[in-house]
């Protein structure tokens, strides 16, 4: 039993029952969609912050090292002695804002691709210098760098 019917006095009757318009359903659905987008946005933000703060990329005089993750850790390494080709991927926005990807092809099917990094040209330049140093120590020729 509804509240209004429960509080009617003896002999009192309902003449007209008002109802909310269906537009409230649209507003409720829109709020739910906005909340979903907001929750997804917060999840993506937290994921990106964790990725940003826990990812390490390093070039040593002997290898490339990348570590990702905080609780679950994923690490990749590539010996510089096994590098065959170095490629730079930097689009228009990357050139304007100073970011890009560096792909390093090792022997076999091994490909080491950085996430978007700042100053990819400097990274590639330092990588090529390290490759030349490794090649000079081994008496071979350095890896071939692809033209951008």
Image (cartoon, rainbow, N blue to C red):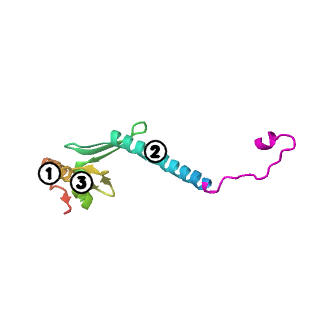
Q: Nearer the viewer, mark 3 or mark 1?
A: 3
Q: In the image, is 76 to the left or to the right of 1?
A: left
The residue closer to the viewer here, 127 or 115, is: 115
Name the residue at 79% across, 52% down: 15
Q: CA distance from mark 3 to mark 2?
A: 26 Å
Q: In the image, is 35 to the left or to the right of 5?
A: left
Could you tell me if the residues under marks 1 and 2 are in contact, i.e. CB atoms within 8 Å?
A: no
Q: Residues within 10 Å of mark 1 (few under 14, many from 20)?
A: some
Name the mark on residue 43.
2
Quadrant of the drawing holding the C terminus: bottom left
Q: Which residue is label 3 attached to?
A: 97
Q: Residue furthest right?
A: 11
Q: Position of residue 67 (x, y in %)?
A: 33, 42
Quadrant of the drawing holding the N terminus: top right
Q: Which residue is label 1 attached to?
A: 132
- Report the span colored magenta: 1-23
């Amino acid at each position: 039993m509804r509240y209004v019917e429960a509080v009617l006095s003896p002999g009192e009757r309902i003449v007209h029952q008002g109802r909310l318009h269906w537009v409230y359903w649209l507003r409720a659905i829109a709020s739910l969609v906005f909340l979903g987008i907001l929750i997804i946005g917060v999840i993506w933000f937290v994921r990106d912050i964790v990725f940003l703060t826990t990812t390490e990329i390093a070039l040593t005089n002997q290898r490339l090292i990348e570590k990702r993750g905080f609780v679950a850790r994923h690490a990749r390494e590539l010996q510089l002695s096994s590098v065959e080709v170095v490629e730079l991927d930097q689009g228009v926005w990357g050139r304007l804002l100073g970011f890009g990807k560096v792909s390093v092809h090792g022997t076999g099917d091994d490909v080491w691709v950085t996430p978007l990094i700042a100053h990819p040209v400097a990274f590639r330049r330092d990588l090529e210098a390290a490759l030349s140093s490794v090649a000079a120590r081994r008496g071979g020729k350095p890896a071939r760098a692809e033209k951008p």
